[in-house]
Image (tube, helix red, strand yellow):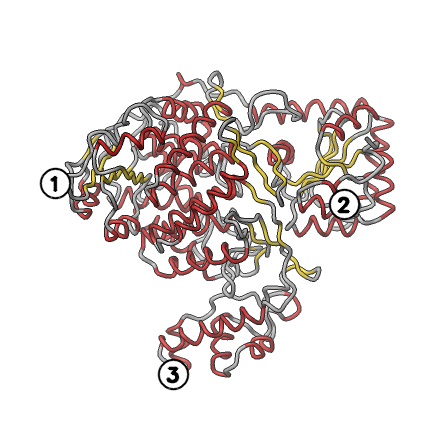
Amino acid sequence: MSNPLEDNRLDAEGSPYLRQHADNPVDWQPWDDDALAAAEREDRPIFLSIGYSSCHWCHVMAEESFSDPAVAETLNEHFVPIKVDREERPDVDRIYQTLAQLLGQQGGWPLSVWLTPDRRPFYVGTYFPREPQGGRPGFEQLLEDLNETWENDRETVEERAEQWADAVAGRLEGTPDSPSEITDSPDGQLLETAAQSAVRQADREHGGFGRGGPKFPQPGRLHLLLGADARLDGASGDAGSDVDLDGIAGSELKESGDADVDAETYRTVLTETLDAMVSGGLYDHVGGGFHRYATDRSWTVPHFEKMLYDNAEIPRALVEGYRATGNERYARVARETFEFLDRELGHPDGAFYSTLDARSEGEEGTFYVWTPEAVRDAVDDETTAWLALERYGITEDGNFEDGRTVLTISAELEELAATSGLDEAEIDDRLERARKQLFAARGERPRPARDEKILAGWNGLAISALAEGSLALDAELADRAVDALAFVREHLWDAEAGLLKRRYADGDVRIDGYLEDYAFLARGAFDCYQATGDPDHLAFALDLAREIEARFFDEGAGTLYFTEAGETDLLARPQEVTDRSTPSSAGVAVDVLLSLSAFVPHDRFDSVARSVLSTHHDAIAADPLQHASLALAADHAGSGASELTIAADAVPQSWRERIGRTFLPSRILARRPPTDGGLDAWLETLNIESAPPIFADRATKDGEPTVYACREFTCSRPLTDVEEALAWFDAGA
């Protein structure tokens, strides 16, 4: 093997991001045993650069510094340069992002970290310009300064590295709370406290959270508002109001001062945020799909990259918002986003690619922005072009760079009707024609690059969103969800070993899955079962749940770790209990374990879930908004799921549509055969010996499709009218 310090080895990697740097004069290495061993053998510090393919400032730093022969010479001579794709190795990223946060830095990408040869950090930052600017040191000078310090003041570097490594390990591995310190609290307190915190942080003028920019989607906070709204509005009933929560929701919550917050306030903050997201520049009004975040308070100018996880989690929140409010705009945007997923990120064999770049032709946003002249050239009718200009706020001055405009909804149909003299139906038709013509014209532009690796966990998020969309919007979306699930099972799942791999890229499969891969995919498989009634999807979800318990749960610590136990090249074994750009993997795992516990004749899944919630009780109670997924899971554990078990050969279409349009907190839609005799084959498929309570003795009544509504071991009588079943939840059992 060639000395890994002598050449750039990234051309052999499957990651598109790493391959982007294969032609740099920097002798980049992947994060692997060869590179790490070389650092220790040569006693050189490591320069670790973490990014991803659609990251704008990653591109800038590459063009300014990593393509510069002088900078490369300094890096190659004094350091072991290692590149990491944070989408492939979120464990490595989590370690060093935690350090940045501990030091009071904002974090983000590119993340630049200097490590001792044994991987302890001693300097960290994000983007560094080639030359000093804006208070940031120049990158080449920084390299020279750090090398000089390493050579002449090694003792100081080692002391700092030891302190920082201990701090990171302490934060990530943390001492769990003692269960004996946990006390009970009234049902709903944790959820409502989190929702009240969301209300306090809401921007009531522009929507979203925080009084400035940037603005991030934060779907977890929207789900908190939806849950609190349902509780106070009575939609979730009172079935669990006297249930002992076993310490899940804490009594040590801070006084919020918002005891008078009512359901209407929660719903108003929810709709203000959803309205801002679907009307502003975060949403692509021509081609569908959402950009990563808005750079300003008013949601006007986005950071233009498009991520699979955003375009899964945001439409899922829109579907729930549609269920709760009936707002057809949410349904329409969700549908358009699903169309975008299929068209722009869909693999021909079913799965979904990871990202679209923010840039084309070397500039961010070029593909998406417009001038009045470009609109008039694309739209074949003068009146229709005028309507498009007014609708989307496209002006000569623009709201972006160089007189170009990011499209936003700047005029509603009634305003355009009053100005134009046309009726709203005709305006709507003309605008749709204009959108199609703009889309066609935009298709002639150079397209943003696409990162075509397939990640198990992110596909799980998309599968889940599509499955829920199939219940609420269009039954055919279930087919798309099932296709994606089948691809992941075929290419990334080893059923015999119970092993899920994380990444597929052009036939290359690598990296053992993390907790997020198992948890997100388990939720997707379970949601496919709910949408289709196919027990094979439920069986796969149960298989993944068993692996979550076996691979990631530490009984002694009472927690779920992000990585499996065993030898590791990391400083610490991280946990992921807070929501970030994706939901907390621990929160999703706990929630799906609680749901799946209803389908097994044992209590292990339930015990694991409640153990994790108890362990992290104090952290959730102290800051439930940052722990949104775990707070929602705690509410699920305390209040119970909204269970609907349907015994039938086929669920009546009217039932499916009615249930699909109804918002039910922690809903479980369980399909089973109409007779107990037909259930035996299902149990064999599910690899369980006896019928769990959700299936047992719940056959059809008088040969008709029959539904059983339950919450917290309290059930309705067998019903043949779905309206009666849904009313049972409202009536409080």
Q: Which mark is residue 702?
A: 1
Front position among marks 2 and 3: 2
Residue closer to the observer: 356 or 110:
356
Q: Secondary structure at mark 3?
A: loop
Q: Quadrant of residue 694?
A: top left
Judge whether 421 appears above or below 673 on screen. below
> Could you tell me which quadrant the C terminus lies in?
top left
Furthest toward the left, the residue is 702
* Circle 3/circle 1 CB separation < 8 Å: no
Which residue appears at 41% of the width and 18% of the height?
Answer: 179
- SS at circle 1: loop
Q: Which mark is residue 421?
A: 3
Q: Residues within 10 Å of mark 2 (few under 14, many from 20)?
A: many
The residues bearing labels 3 and 1 have C-alpha atoms spaced at a distance of 59 Å
Q: Amino acid at mark 1?
A: Asp
Instruction: Give amino acid for label 3.
Output: Gly
Q: Say the numbered circle drawn on residue 22.
A: 2
Q: Disc 2 vs disc 3: Cβ atoms closer than 8 Å?
A: no
